């Protein structure tokens, strides 16, 4: 039997878009006292956190079924603003995604497919965001509003869903795609 995986369903992006988001994250870092900022290759949009499991094949099957049965064709999402989830000791900073009916529908279909397969997926409204830093404390002179005005306005293609694995390799957090399923043109 295989080992444990730390799985999540996600949307990945083109390398040039990840680079623009990473450079923006470095702008936030330059205006921070501290923080752990997302590596360029790890930038993604999480649709569903599956958690630690040995059931990789079940997760793959659920994701494939969710995508094949989806009524959503490939679409584009747009970046919007800088936001944060406040935490003691440092906040989680993220780039928000404009509300998208296609993204919400896809999220509902994927999470439902995972639940049918027996995965315990939290039922909550999608708050689409791209995490750029954790444990972030801004310098006193830096403001969220000023940094938000610098968010790159990107149009990001959503045409595949990935089953991602999160693992720490030589002390560095790495996300790797275990499989992908392409959205069909409907």
Image (spheres, rainbow, N blue to C red):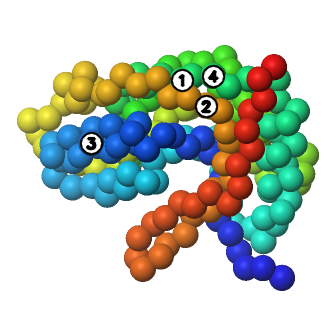
Q: Is residue 171 above or below residue 163?
A: below
Q: Give the residue number, with chain letter if any, for mark 1.
A: 77
Q: Give the residue number, with chain letter if any, for mark 2.
A: 158
Instruction: Using the rendered view, name the quadrant where residue 128 is placed.
Output: top right
Q: Residue at x 39, y 39 (%)?
A: 16
Q: Is residue 81 above or below residue 21?
A: above
Mark 1–mark 4 distance (CA, rounded to whole Å) = 7 Å
First in sequence: mark 1 or mark 3?
A: 3
Q: Give the residue number, with chain letter if any, for mark 3.
A: 23
In x, y percent, where is residue 57?
A: 83, 63
Mark 4–mark 3 distance (CA, rounded to whole Å) = 25 Å
Circle 4 residues within 10 Å: few <14, some 14–19, many ≥20? some
**Residue 134 - label:** none
Mark 2–mark 1 distance (CA, rounded to whole Å) = 7 Å
Any part of residue 120 in sight: yes
Q: Give the residue number, with chain letter if any, for mark 4.
A: 75
């Amino acid at each position: 039997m295989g080992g444990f995986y730390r799985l999540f369903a996600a949307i990945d992006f083109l390398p040039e878009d990840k680079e623009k988001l990473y450079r923006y994250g470095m702008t936030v870092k330059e205006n921070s006292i501290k923080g752990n900022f997302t590596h360029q290759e790890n930038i993604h949009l999480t649709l569903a956190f599956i958690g630690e499991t040995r059931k990789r094949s079940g997760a793959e099957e659920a994701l494939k079924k969710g995508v094949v049965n989806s009524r959503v064709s490939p679409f584009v999402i747009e970046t919007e603003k800088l936001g944060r989830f406040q935490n003691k000791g440092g906040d989680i900073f993220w780039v928000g995604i404009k509300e998208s009916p296609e993204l919400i529908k896809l999220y509902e279909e994927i999470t439902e497919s995972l639940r049918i397969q027996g995965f315990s997926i939290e039922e909550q409204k999608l708050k689409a965001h791209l995490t750029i830093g954790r444990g972030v404390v801004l310098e006193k002179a830096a403001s969220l509003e000023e940094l938000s005005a610098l968010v790159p306005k990107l149009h990001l293609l959503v045409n595949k869903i990935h089953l991602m694995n999160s693992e720490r390799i030589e002390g560095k957090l790495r996300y790797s795609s275990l499989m992908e399923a392409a959205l069909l043109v409907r």
